[in-house]
Amino acid sequence: MVILDAMEKASRVRVLQAELNDQPGVCLKLAGDLGDVQAAAEVASSIAGAMRTAIVVDVIAGPDPAARPAYEAKADFNALFEQATVQIPPAARKREKTMSQQSSFAVGLIETQGFTAVFEAIDTAVKTANVEVLAREKLGGGYITVLIKGDVAAVTAAVEAGKARVEGLGKLIAAHVIPSPSQAVLSLLPKL
C-alpha cells in the first residue's frame, strides 16, 4: 500500500489489478503512458529500498493484446485466507482513466507475523487514539496486517502504540501511516 500510494502520487498511473502471490506479497499491475509507468517503477524501487523490502519491478512497453489472458486474472476469492486473492478496482473493470485524488484522512497499517501480536497491537492502537479498524488481511505464513483509519495525528499515535506492543509477542514486519491515501490505495481497501 505504501509503495502504491507513492507511485500514484508521483505519476499518472492506474491500478488494473492487485494479485496475491505465493510469497507474502502482492503483484500490482498498473497502466498508463510509458513515461508515467517508468516513473512509478522508479518510485517503487526507491521506496522498497528505503523500506529494505525486496521487490521485482518490470515495465512492459506496449504489451501485445494477445498476452492479456496471461496477465489479466479474473477476480478471485480464497476461502482459506478469507479474502480476495485478485482484486480489480471498479475503475479498472470499466477500463476508465481516473485522476489521482487524495482523501482527507490517514490509513495506518500494522503487519506482524503472529496473530497474538497483531491482536494486541490493534487493541492497544484503538485504546490509544480515536481510530477505526478497517480490516485485517491474512497473507499466509502467519503474516497478518490490520488497517486503521482516522486523522493523521490519531493514526500516527495509534500505530506507534500498537507497534510498541508487538515486542515479545510476535515479529513486527511493518508499521506505517499513509496520510491522505491515493485513490489507488483506497480502491484496494475494504469499503470505507
Image (spheres, grey):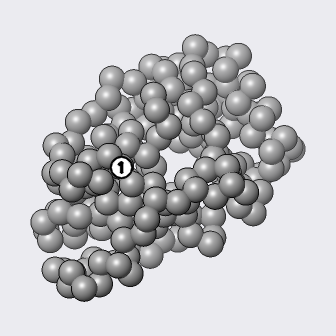
User: What's the residue at 38%, 81% (across, down)?
Assistant: 70
Tell whether 160 sits left or right of 46.
right
Is 99 located above or below residue 192 in the figure?
below
Is 40 located above or below residue 151 in the figure?
below
Tell whether 72 sits left or right of 146.
left
Count of numbered labels shown in the rendering: 1
Tell whether 44 sits left or right of 154.
left
Numbered disc 1: secondary structure: loop
The picture places residue 137, in percent across and down from the top left corner, at: 63, 47
Amino acid under disc 1:
Pro
* Residue under pointer 1: 89
User: What's the residue at 23%, 64% (across, down)?
Assistant: 31
87 or 114, which lies in front?
87
Task: State the image quarter where residue 186 is shown.
Answer: top left
User: What's the residue at 67%, 20% (across, down)?
Assistant: 126
Whether residue 65 can be seen here: yes
The picture places residue 89, in percent across and down from the top left corner, at: 35, 49
The picture places residue 56, in percent across and down from the top left corner, at: 44, 76
Is 136 located above or below residue 129 in the figure?
below
Quadrant showing the C terminus = top left
Tell whether 111 sits left or right of 17.
right
The picture places residue 177, in percent across and down from the top left corner, at: 49, 36
